[in-house]
Image (cartoon, rainbow, N blue to C red):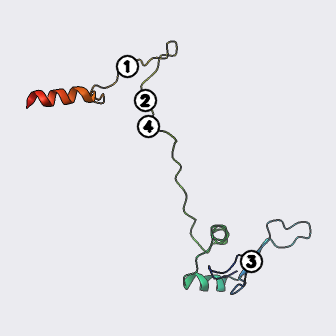
C-alpha cells in the first residue's frame, strides 16, 4: 500500500500495491501478492518502504538486504591476561606502560622542575 507519511496508519492510501497474509490458514490462500511494476514505480519516484515492507520486498527480490545492526559487547575491552584458577590472581603482571601514575605525583614533579 502506498500512503502519504503524514496520513494516519489506517487512513487514506494512494494505491494498493499488494497484500500479505501472515497466517494463510487451511483455505490454501496465497501468502503474498505484489504488483511488481507499481512497486518499482513508487520506489523510483522516492517512496520509502517501512522496515517490515523492506524485508518483504527483499524476499521478493526487489530490494537489497536491509542494513544489519552491528552488535557490540557490553562493557569495556576484556583483560586477556591468564588467571590462576586456585587463587584467582593474574599469572603475569600488567605492562608498566599501561599503568598510570597517580595525579598527585605528577603535580609535585612539575612544581619541582619549575
Which label lies toward us, 3 or 4?
Answer: 3
Q: Residue at the top extreme?
A: 86
Could you tell me residue 109's position as x and y percent?
Answer: 15, 27
Q: In what element is the residue under mark 2?
A: loop
Q: Which residue is mark 1?
A: 92
Q: On residue 80, which mark appears?
A: 2
Q: CA distance from mark 4 to mark 1?
A: 18 Å
Where is mark 4, residue-wise? 77
Image position of 31 with respect to 40: above or below: above
- The quadrant holding residue 107 is top left
Front disc: 2 or 3:
3
Q: Residues within 10 Å of mark 3 (few under 14, many from 20)?
A: few
Secondary structure beneath label 3 = loop
For residue 19, side relative to residue 107 (left or right): right
- Toward the right, the furthest residue is 27
Q: Are marks 2 and 3 in contact (CB under 8 Å)?
A: no
Q: Report, in whole angstroms, how far the alpha carbon at label 1 lies from the one at label 2.
A: 10 Å
Q: Which residue is mark 3?
A: 10
Q: Nearer the viewer, mark 4 or mark 1?
A: 4
Precedes in sequence: disc 2 or disc 3: 3
Classify mark 1: helix, strand or loop: loop
Quarter of the picture holding the C terminus: top left
Q: Position of residue 98 (x, y in %)?
A: 30, 30
- Judging depth in this view, the residue of 12 and 38 nearest the camera is 12
Amino acid at each position: 500500500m502506498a500512503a502519504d507519511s503524514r496520513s494516519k496508519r489506517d487512513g487514506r492510501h494512494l494505491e494498493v500495491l499488494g497484500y500479505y497474509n501472515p497466517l494463510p490458514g487451511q483455505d490454501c490462500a496465497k501468502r503474498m501478492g505484489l504488483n511488481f511494476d507499481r512497486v518499482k514505480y513508487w520506489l523510483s519516484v522516492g517512496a520509502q518502504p517501512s522496515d517490515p515492507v523492506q524485508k518483504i520486498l527483499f524476499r521478493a527480490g526487489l530490494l537489497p538486504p536491509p542494513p544489519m545492526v552491528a552488535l557490540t559487547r557490553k562493557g569495556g575491552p576484556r583483560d586477556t591476561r591468564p588467571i590462576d584458577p586456585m587463587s584467582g590472581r593474574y599469572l603475569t603482571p600488567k605492562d608498566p606502560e599501561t599503568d598510570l601514575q597517580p595525579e598527585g605525583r605528577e603535580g609535585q614533579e612539575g612544581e619541582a622542575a619549575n
